Image: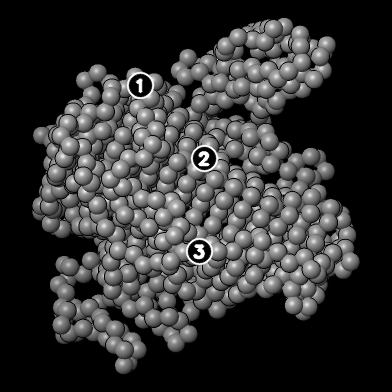
């Protein structure tokens, strides 16, 4: 029998029919499902793992299923919008290949207007290279870019923060950014859209299709790649009623669609599309099919949009997300993202521009945020309006961060299905589910002034989320509050790097704008509809001690939540050892009802609980180039990443007990309001799965493994209830338990972690089914590091040298964890030669471990081989007539017959060999 959790939902008859096509998990096990389980079992055997440890009764072998509705996606495609009865060739309107950008911009827009006035049609971009500024799309008008046709972003004048000109324009600029009254509620890039290469707002029935290219970059006279569409945003204006810049603006998006309906993008290629190659904001009924997007930041943003299908496309975006669903307020409406279907796609983090050429190079090692290549399928971080009913199937992740779900802004994330996917070379948590309380949500303030950052109003932190109390703004009265912390104390553990933590002597701040003082007493405010303003609430008196709880107001009545997630049939290999699968709820809003089924995960391993205790900042420099760009220096973090891990998250996880420091790796800080990224929690005490604040977790046929021994437990469960792990197989080091369960006697309610004298309570694990997995119970009996001392726990100290805590090994002497950043081959393309010719092919590699430590001066931006300590070789038999010289790492091949041959080269640093297979065609 099966236990079924019913999820109420409403949807159309078409959705029901499509769900019947996809099917649900039922009592019967289909042949396909059986084969999936068999595949995981086979993978476990190959890893040297034991068979699943399950209990034997029929009743106990049942697993919960979730009756999750599948997304059906859009109802529009190329065939629906195709209209070639009237064609408008841009060259007939004055566009010239390699011609003047201003003339081309006018010609293309004139062609679009002509088609629009005629009742619709298709504007045609023929073969040629046409530079242009903003192209304004119109309802009922399609744009076809033919083979060898290019729409290229024209240059605008650009200046750096110091006023120095960094790009000389070509006589024009992109459209001036519009006014958005809801600026400040989301980043600039999700707020202003008019300064894009292609732009449409409040339009319908639009299609861009063909075999051509949209290119946001160019090669200068020296052969160096220059990005014209910027990955950054113009400066924010001061007031909500101002246009979206403070001094100047420029183009930073390839395609921006705002509140549009019935949109198709089909067949085109996009190269270096700026901050967003494609952003759909508040858009309904959209199809993206057969695209290659190879870009310098986000590839495709689906923001507060509904009824979307993404299929048969490749999105390459090392520096930002590949397919990302957001739910911001950028469209000026409260609109959840829902009914999104993603199928048969590839997301990857190769060097920008290298996928379109077929090279797929890997010279850039980390993104701008210092985590590894991004390029993932993600929900968030903007989650103001929530997400519902998204189905992801048959997606291949290559050199990316994995699957990410974030609900942190007061709304829910529900009914998510991911199935039949693969991930290889994963640079962060393969699966990341995070509930947080950043609370980026509109809230009406006291003020009528229209400055984006309201002063002396209902929020001390993130004041841009406060809306003026004016008729032209939607109304969001205060619903709840959270404290504000004084993160002003600078500390250093190693004398090399420093960071700020909550000041133990003065941890909280008071916001008098939320408190009315009457006759010496403090009262909260309430919203009065009749007066359309806040008035003192004489029924809610607040003590002066409790005033600290009311620093930041939000209109989000509830905490964010995540529920009803099913991830199945996933094979994951070559995972960064720092980041386990991470399921992280809140103590007051647990992640609910998650099933992980038929999943195998292989980590590189090589870490221990020492790294989870110390939280070291360890770095090297690295010089890289992407597809012809100028060499650039970046910093590689080898353990914690301080771009995301902040404040208390950087403190060593130790406790002061009986006059000495004691390791406390399971006392992980909550970090509820920080930017949600797997690296926010630093190095965790589990290598495979870390689950905290979860209610309803099924791990069915899940295999966890590593290549190099990892001395941490495979799984840590902290405040987890109703979990079934009976068919988990997990590799562990000798003497290390597979599962650690945590009981913590020092937890506080969400957001109140550092409020003095806030009562503590206990969390623990309940109703766990662990089968035959070895286990250990640990107890956390001190507050998390960085918690200020108070009357409830008086002897708390910051773990810093001033208080007697020091690392045993100096940072500059600490060995690099070589399983984190791996050697790689420089580009080797497939080879072609004629029978009778001899191929001489020299291969080379680069090793990040040979980079200069960040404790030393930064090197010049010059690319060096840095292949010291690497051994070159080949794997398998070489073709007849081939030989390999390991000293010169050169292959010599005189083929004896026509055909296709494969040679696999190896690169060995003594840790994990790296392989690269090259195809050689002899004609």
Looking at the image, can residue 642 be seen?
Answer: no
Place residue 205 in its image quadrant.
bottom right
Q: CA distance from mark 3 to mark 2?
A: 22 Å
> Looking at the rendered structure, which numbered label has been put on residue 45?
1
Residue at point 77% right, 15% down? 898
Q: Earlier in the sequence, mark 3 or mark 2?
A: 3
Place residue 753 in its image quadrant.
bottom left
Residue 550 point in image, percent of width and height:
25, 69
In screen coordinates, is 146 left or right of 556? right
> Does residue 914 lie above or below 334 as drawn?
above
Residue at point 55% right, 45% down? 345
Q: Earlier in the sequence, mark 1 or mark 3?
A: 1
Residue at point 36% right, 50% down? 24
> Does residue 47 lie above or below 485 as drawn?
above
Looking at the image, can residue 475 be seen?
Answer: yes
Q: On the rendered image, what quadrant is the N terminus found in? A: top left
Residue behind mark 2 = 396
* SS for dot 2: strand
* SS for dot 1: helix
Residue at point 35% right, 89% down? 532
Residue behind mark 3 = 307
């Amino acid at each position: 029998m099966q236990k079924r959790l019913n999820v109420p939902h409403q949807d159309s008859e078409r959705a029901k029919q499509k769900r019947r096509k996809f099917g649900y998990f039922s009592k019967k096990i289909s042949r396909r499902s059986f084969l999936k389980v068999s595949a995981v079992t086979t993978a476990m055997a190959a890893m040297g793992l034991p068979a699943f440890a399950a209990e034997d009764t029929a009743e106990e072998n049942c697993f919960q299923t979730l009756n999750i509705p599948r997304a059906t996606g859009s109802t529009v495609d190329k065939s629906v919008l195709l209209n070639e009865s009237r064609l408008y060739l841009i060259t007939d309107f004055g566009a010239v290949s390699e011609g003047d950008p201003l003339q081309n911009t006018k010609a293309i827009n004139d062609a679009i207007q002509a088609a629009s006035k005629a009742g619709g049609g298709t504007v045609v971009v023929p073969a040629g290279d046409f530079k242009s500024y903003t192209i304004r799309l119109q309802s009922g008008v399609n744009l076809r870019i033919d083979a060898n046709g290019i729409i290229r972003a024209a240059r605008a004048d650009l200046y750096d923060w110091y006023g120095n000109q960094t790009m000389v324009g070509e006589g024009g600029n992109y459209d001036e950014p519009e006014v958005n009254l809801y600026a400040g509620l989301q980043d600039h890039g999700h707020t202003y859209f008019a300064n894009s290469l292609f732009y449409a707002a409040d339009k319908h029935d639009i299609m861009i299709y063909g075999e051509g290219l949209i290119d946001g970059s160019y090669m200068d006279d020296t052969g160096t790649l220059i990005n014209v569409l910027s990955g950054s945003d113009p400066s924010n204006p001061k007031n909500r009623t101002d246009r979206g810049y403070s001094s100047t603006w420029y183009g930073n998006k390839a395609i921006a669609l705002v509140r549009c309906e019935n949109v198709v993008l089909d067949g085109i290629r996009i190269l270096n599309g700026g901050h967003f190659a494609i952003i759909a904001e508040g858009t309904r009924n959209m199809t993206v099919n057969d695209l290659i997007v190879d870009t310098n930041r986000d590839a495709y943003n689906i923001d507060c949009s509904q009824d979307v299908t993404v299929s048969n496309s490749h999105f390459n975006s090392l520096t930002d997300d590949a397919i990302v669903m957001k739910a911001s307020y950028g469209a000026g409406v409260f609109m959840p993202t829902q009914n999104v279907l993603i199928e048969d796609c590839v997301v990857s983090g190769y060097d920008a521009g290298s996928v379109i050429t077929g090279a797929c190079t890997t010279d850039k090692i980390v993104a701008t945020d210092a985590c590894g290549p991004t390029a993932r399928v993600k929900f968030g971080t903007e989650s103001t309006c929530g997400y519902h009913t998204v189905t992801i199937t048959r997606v291949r992740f290559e050199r990316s961060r994995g699957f990410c779900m974030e609900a942190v802004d007061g709304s829910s994330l529900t009914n998510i299905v991911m199935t039949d996917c693969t991930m290889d070379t994963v640079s962060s948590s393969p699966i990341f589910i995070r509930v947080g309380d950043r609370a980026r949500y509109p809230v009406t303030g006291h003020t009528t002034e229209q400055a984006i950052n309201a002063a002396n109003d209902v929020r001390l932190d993130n004041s841009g989320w406060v809306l003026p109390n004016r008729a032209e703004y939607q109304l969001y009265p205060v619903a709840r509050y959270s404290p504000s912390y004084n993160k002003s104390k600078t500390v250093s553990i190693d004398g090399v790097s420093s960071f700020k933590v909550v000041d133990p002597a003065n941890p909280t701040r008071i916001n008098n704008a939320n408190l009315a003082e009457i006759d010496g007493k403090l009262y909260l405010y309430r919203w009065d509809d009749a007066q359309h303003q806040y008035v003192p609430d004489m029924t809610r008196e607040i003590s002066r001690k409790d005033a600290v709880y009311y620093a930041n107001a939000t209109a989000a009545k509830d905490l964010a939540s995540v529920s009803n997630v099913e991830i199945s049939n996933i094979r994951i290999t070559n995972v960064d050892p720092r980041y386990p699968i991470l399921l992280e709820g809140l103590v007051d809003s647990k992640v609910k009802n998650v099933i992980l089924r038929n999943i195998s995960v292989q980590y590189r391993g090589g870490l221990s609980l020492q790294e989870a205790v110390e939280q070291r900042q360890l770095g090297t420099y690295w010089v890289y180039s992407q597809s012809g760009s100028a060499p650039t220096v970046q910093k590689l973090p080898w353990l914690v990443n301080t771009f995301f891990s902040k404040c208390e998250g950087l403190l060593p996880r130790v406790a002061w007990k009986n006059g000495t420091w004691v390791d406390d790796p399971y006392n992980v800080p909550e970090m509820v309001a920080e930017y949600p990224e797997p690296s926010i929690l630093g190095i965790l005490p589990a290598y495979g799965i870390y689950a905290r604040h979860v209610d309803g977790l099924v791990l069915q046929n899940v295999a966890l493994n590593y290549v190099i021994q990892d001395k941490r437990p495979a799984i840590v469960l902290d405040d987890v209830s109703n979990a079934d792990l009976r068919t988990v197989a997990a590799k562990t080091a000798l003497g290390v338990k597979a599962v650690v369960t945590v009981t913590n006697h020092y937890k506080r309610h969400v957001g109140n972690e550092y409020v003095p004298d806030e009562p503590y309570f206990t969390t623990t694990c309940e109703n766990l089914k662990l089968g035959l997995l070895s286990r250990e119970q640990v107890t956390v009996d001190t507050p998390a590091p960085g918690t200020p001392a108070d009357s409830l726990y008086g002897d708390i100290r910051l773990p810093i040298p001033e208080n007697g805590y020091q690392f045993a090994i100096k940072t500059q002497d600490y060995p690099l964890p070589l399983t984190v950043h791996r050697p790689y081959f420089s580009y080797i393309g497939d080879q072609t030669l004629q029978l009778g010719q001899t191929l001489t092919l020299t291969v080379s590699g680069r090793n990040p471990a040979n980079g200069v430590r960040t404790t030393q001066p930064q090197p010049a931006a010059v690319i060096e081989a840095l292949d010291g300590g690497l051994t070159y070789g080949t794997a398998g038999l070489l073709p007849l007539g081939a030989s390999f010289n390991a000293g010169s790492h050169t292959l010599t091949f005189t083929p004896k017959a026509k055909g296709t041959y494969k040679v696999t080269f190896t690169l060995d640093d003594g840790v994990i060999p790296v392989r690269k297979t090259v195809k050689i065609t002899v004609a």
